[in-house]
Amino acid sequence: MTMTDDNGTASAERPADHHGSAAPYTVPRPPASIDAGIWPGIAAVPSGFKANGAARIADGIFKAAVRRLPLEVRYPDGQVLGSAPAGSGAPVMTIHRPAQFALRLGDGGLIGLGESYMAGDWDADNLTAVLEVFAERAGTLIPVPLQKLRSIFLPRQPRTERNSLKNTRSNISRHYDLSNELFATFLDETMSYSSALFPASGSAVKDMPWEGFAAAQQAKIDRLLDKAGVGPGTRVLEIGTGWGELALRAAARGATVYSVTLSSEQQALARKRVAEAGYADQVTIELKDYRAVEGEYDAVVSVEMIEAVGYEYWATYFQTIERVLAPGGKVAIQAITIAHDRLLATRTGYTWVHKYIFPGGVIPSVRAIEEVTEKRTGLQVRERLAFGEHYAETLRLWEERFMARKDEVAELGFDAVFQRMWLFYLCYSRAGFASGYLNVQQIVLDRRKNAAVNGGR
C-alpha cells in the first residue's frame, strides 16, 4: 500500500531495522483514506482552536524532550533533533506529517503517539529501539511541574471498562476473541500467549531461534506446575485458560483440572485441543468469571491473568484463591509487574494500550501483590523468579513471526492500520521489558500458618 505524505509524494512500505541491521520484513503503510467506520480515532485528525493550541504546547514539550535523548528525530524540512551524533547508529524516528503528529499528540498525549503511528504520521527504522529510549525515561520525559497536572489533563479509565462482573466479559472479549486464527499466525504450536522461559539467562537471552521456542514455553509452564506441586491426583484450578496448554500439561501429570476463561474463542479451541489429546475426562473448561468459582483445589495456577483484574479487584482475586485453596495447597502465578512508583503514578490513567489492546488492564507491582495478600488475605508470597529479559525475547519472536506472515493477517481481514497497531503493541511491550520498565515474575504463595483455612482476614 501507499500513502501520500505532506509534500504529495507517495511513500511505499519501508524496511524496518532490527538490532542495527535490516529487518526481515517491511512495515505496511496505511491507505491514503482510512475507513472512519473501523478507525474513527485514526481517520480524523483533531481540529479547531483548542486542538491547535494543545498541538503547539505538545510540540514544544516533545521537541524539548527529544533534544536530550540518544536518538535522531528527523523532520521533512531537514531538521534533526536528538542528542545522538549523526551516524552514531542511534535509533531514528522519522516524522512524515509534523502538523498531524502534533495535533494527535496534543489531543491524546501518549495515546496520540500511538495513534499517529497507526495513521502513518511517523515511522522508525527500529521501532522497539525508539520506544525503548522513551521507556527508559518514562518518569522524566515530562517536566515535573506538568507531571503534577497529570490528573487534570490526562484521561481516566472509563467506568464501563472497570473490571466489574458486568464489564469484565466485554473487556476480555475485545482482545482475546479477535480471532484464534490471528493469534495462530504469530504464536508457536503451544498457543502460549505469555513469556517463555529460555534455557539461557541474563545477557545470553538474545537472538533465541524460533526452533526451541515451544520448548521454552513449556518450560515456563512446567516450572509453575512444579512450584504448585502438581502431580497425580492433584486438583488444579487454572484462572485464565489461554488456549489450553497448561491444562494439557497438568493433565499429562495425572492431575484433574478445572479451568475458567471469559473468552469464548479460547474456550472453544482449548476444549478441542483437550479432546484431541484424550484428556476430556480430566479437564473441564468453563466460561466463568474467577469470582464465581466454587470447590476446593490443591493447586491454583494463573498465567498473566492478574493484569486483567484491575487494581480495585486485586484483593478479590487473591481472596477468591484463598477461599478455594485446600489446606496445604499452593498457588503459582505468572505476572507482568511494574515498579511501585510507576504503578501509583499510572494506575488510574487511560492509555493507548487500554484504548486499543487491553481495556481495563492494570499491571501490578510486586509490592502491591505483597501488600494486598498480607493485609487482605491469609496468603503469603514464598518465592519469586524475575525474568523480564525472557519476555523481551519472546516479544521479538512474536514480532518477527507476525510481520513475516502479514499477508496471512491481511487475508483474515485485518488491514494495514490494524497491522501497524499490533506491531506498535508488540514493540511497545518489548521496549518496556528491554528497558526494565516492566518485568515478569513467577510468584509462589501459600497460606500463612496462623491464617484461618478459607477465612482470610
Image (cartoon, helix red, strand yellow):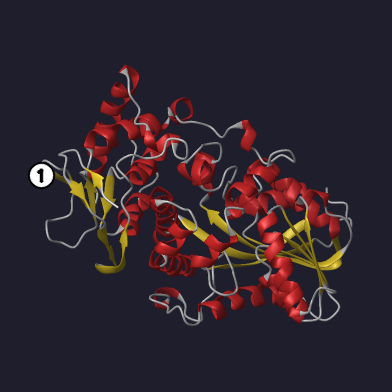
Q: Which of 243 and 147 is in front in this view?
A: 243
Quadrant of the rendered structure where residue 220 is?
Answer: bottom right
Q: Where is residue 261 in the image (x, y as percent from the top left)?
A: 72, 56
Residue 450 visible at all: no
Kind of residue indicated by mark 1 = Gly
Location of residue 47 with respect to 4 vertically, above or below: above
Q: Position of residue 400 (x, y in %)?
A: 39, 67
- Horizontal side of 64 relative to 259 (left or right) equals left
| Secondary element at image label 1 | loop
Asked if one can make out residue 181 in the rendered structure from this viewpoint, the answer is yes
Please identify the quarter of the rendering in which residue 89 is found: bottom left
Q: Mark 1 points at which residue?
A: 78
To which quarter of the image does residue 181 belong? bottom right
Question: At 75% from the left edge and 46% from the top edge, which residue is drawn?
Answer: 316
In this picture, is 340 found above or below 266? above
Q: Which of 237 and 267 is in front in this view?
A: 267
287 sits left or right of 281 in the view: left
Compared to residue 156, the image places residue 206 above or below, namely below
Q: Position of residue 104 (x, y in %)?
A: 34, 34
Name the residue rendered at 79%, 80% in the picture. Answer: 231
x and y percent of residue 429 in the render?
A: 45, 56
Q: Which of 452 and 331 is in front in this view?
A: 331
Outermost residue toward the top in this view: 49
Q: Is residue 143 above or below residue 215?
A: above
433 lies left or right of 158: left
Answer with left or right where residue 321 lies relative to residue 204. right
